[in-house]
Amino acid sequence: MTNDGVWLEQDAAERVHKQVLSRRKVPDGDEQRIATLTPRECEVIELICEGLRNKEISDRLHISMATVSHHLTSVYSKLGVSDRTSLVIYAAKRGLVNL
């Protein structure tokens, strides 16, 4: 456990992730897109919305910058956004993050 959150095993994280997504009210077309996000991709989205840069996300999640970049590319593709700004707007409008 860190001061920034709680570490969960993969199975537990996925169950929590699915429960959170099932409680959100989002436009119909977006539900399927959002449901394809992995728990790690959701973490990256949250950190982007906090204003962190790739290096800071890499350090926080203990992953390489290349992996951060891969997650972002995947998120952009899944959600149909093209940059960080549109990702933050998308996430805020659909309740993926609390700003």
Image (tube, grey):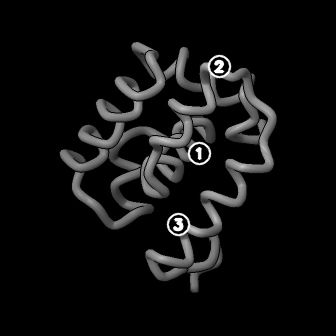
Where is residue 70? Give x, y as percent: 24, 40
Tell me if residue 25 comes above or below residue 22 in the rendering: above
The total of numbered circles placed on residues is 3
Tell me if residue 37 comes above or below residue 26 in the rendering: below
Tell me if residue 61 comes above or below residue 31 in the rendering: below
Residue named by callout 1 = 46
The mark nearer the N terminus, 1 or 3, is: 3
Task: Name the residue: 19% across, 45% down.
Answer: 66
**Between 87 and 54, which is closer to the camera in this rendering?**
87
Question: Cβ–Cβ below 8 Å for labels 1 and 2?
Answer: no
Q: Amino acid at mark 2?
A: Ile
Task: Name the residue: 70% across, 60% down.
Answer: 19
Quadrant in which the C terminus is drawn: top right
Task: Name the residue: 27% across, 38% down.
Answer: 69
Quadrant in which the N terminus is drawn: bottom right
Q: Amino acid at mark 1?
A: Glu
Where is residue 44? Give x, y as percent: 47, 47
Marks 1/3: CA–CA distance: 16 Å
Residue named by callout 3 = 14
Q: Residue furthest bottom?
A: 1
Q: Residue furthest left?
A: 66
Where is residue 98? Give x, y as percent: 78, 41
Tell me if residue 22 comes above or below residue 75 in the rendering: below
Horizontal side, residue 62 vs residue 43: left or right: left
**Between 71 and 21, which is closer to the camera in this rendering?**
21
The mark nearer the N terminus, 1 or 2, is: 1
Residue named by callout 2 = 89
Q: Amino acid at mark 3?
A: Glu
Q: Quadrant of residue 93?
A: top right
- Dot 1 falls on a residue whose secondary structure is helix
Q: Nearer the viewer, mark 3 or mark 2?
A: 3
**Between 33 and 40, which is closer to the camera in this rendering?**
33
